[in-house]
Image: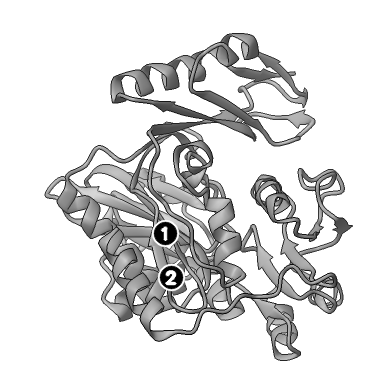
Amino acid sequence: MLNALRSFNIWHSTFKIHYVNAFAQDFKLGVLGGGQLGRMMIQSAIDFNLDIHVLDPDANAPCKHLATDFVVGDLLDYDTVYRWGKDKSLITIEIEKVNTEALEALQQEGVTVYPQPEVIRLIQDKREQKQFYLREGIPTADFILTENAAEVAQHANRLPAVNKLGRGGYDGRGVQLLRSAGDLKDAFDAPGLLEDLVDFETEISVVVARNARGEIRTFPVVEMVFHPTANLVEFLFSPARISVEVANEAERIACDVIEKLDLVGLLAVEMFVTKDGKVLVNEVAPRTHNSGHQTIEGNDTSQFEQHIRAILNWPLGSTAGDALSAMVNVLGEAGFSGPALYEGMDEVLAVDGVHVHLYGKKLTKPFRKMGHVTITDSTYEGLTKKARFVKDTLKVKA
């Protein structure tokens, strides 16, 4: 975290410390999105007695019963977002699929919006993301832009490669591997990109925070293991089992990305570590992220509290790890849809260092994120053993 500490020292000596008056009686923190990330953000905000106002299209979203005020509405509709946001003191997001034009209009009228609308817009489009990396000298896999499936087919010589939709992908959707010419029939018939397949050793992520005064802190690098078919994170381990040199480079890159974006808030930077030790940025998310859930029990400050601190321009919290930690996603079992039933909960809760977090979703379906489990231990061996036990034991059926 040398870059984080360096930035803190510069900030501390250069800027006068001041605080957003989030404790004023009329302060309203608006959150676009009412999913599980918003729910866990509210759980942290309760510690500071903050009023959280949520807009989400799902009348039964996980935030519904925790928010000070919950409104059902389309996050992509200009008028809905604009009207909802007019009386908010500060607006943030828990999902990037939002109407940025409405956020810009609100910003121009004096509503603070973090992360900034222009940053959200850039990150909403993977094509824009990749071109940003190229312009700014941020290491990433080589790619070409494509407009439709026919254009993808013209580049069969680049296969195997990863075909990504420019816009609309989420939780593994909108990303597919094209191994050979026989897979070209499945190419996305919409603007996207074709990215060189990286021969990587491991996938890692760095969650980095930055407040409006330029203070930056990174969480320890985490190692991600993806589900073989759902393209969702199945396990993650913190800190990642990588060399100090690779970890320092990953943190340096994460700090570089958030500074060059000039983003205020939290940024998850997903990266590949190649077999020859290079670190390449894959994608970023301008919000709290699945790869930061273990921070709730594993670090001095959780990613959710850190996000609140960053957007309110408070001093950022310590990101030191209190123990080795892991996270297991609790996903709906294949073949089951309907009211959720949990099997194996007693057995999992009997294990020391295991903490279950359910998201308040009443209905399950295959691979739906129903919750997660954080795990702490003093050794990687113990951590891995517990993680496997949780994955094999806790099942969501209907």
User: Residue at the spot x=34%, y=65% of the render?
Assistant: 4
* Residue 51 - label: none
Tell me: residue 212, above or below residue 75: below
Q: Is residue 198 visible?
A: no
Residue 288, quarter of picture: bottom right
Residue 84, quarter of picture: bottom right
Q: Residue furthest bottom?
A: 108
**Mark with earlier residue (2, 1):** 2
Estimate the x, y position of residue 106 in percent, counting from the top left: 75, 83
Q: Residue furthest left?
A: 276
User: Residue at the spot x=21%, y=42% of the render?
Assistant: 242
The residue nearer to you, when weighing 24 against 369, is 24
Using residue 384 as the reference point, say whether residue 122 is left or right of it: right
Image quadrant in which the N terminus is located: bottom left
Using residue 302 as the reference point, say whether residue 358 is left or right of it: right
Q: Secondary structure at mark 1?
A: strand
User: Residue at the spot x=37%, y=61% of the render?
Assistant: 194
The residue nearer to you, when weighing 286 against 208, is 208
Tell me: residue 99, above or below residue 349: below
Which residue in the structure is indicated by mark 1?
A: 283
The residue nearer to you, when weighing 279 against 162, is 279
Q: Amino acid at mark 2?
A: Gln
Image quadrant in which the C terminus is located: top right
* Residue 129 - label: 2
Q: CA distance from mark 2 to mark 1?
A: 8 Å
Estimate the x, y position of residue 388 in percent, counting from the top left: 42, 18
Q: Amino acid at mark 1?
A: Glu
Using residue 301 as the reference point, say whether residue 58 is left or right of it: right
User: Residue at the spot x=57%, y=75% of the render?
Assistant: 121
Estimate the x, y position of residue 175 in percent, counting from the top left: 47, 51
Estimate the x, y position of residue 344 in percent, counting from the top left: 62, 11
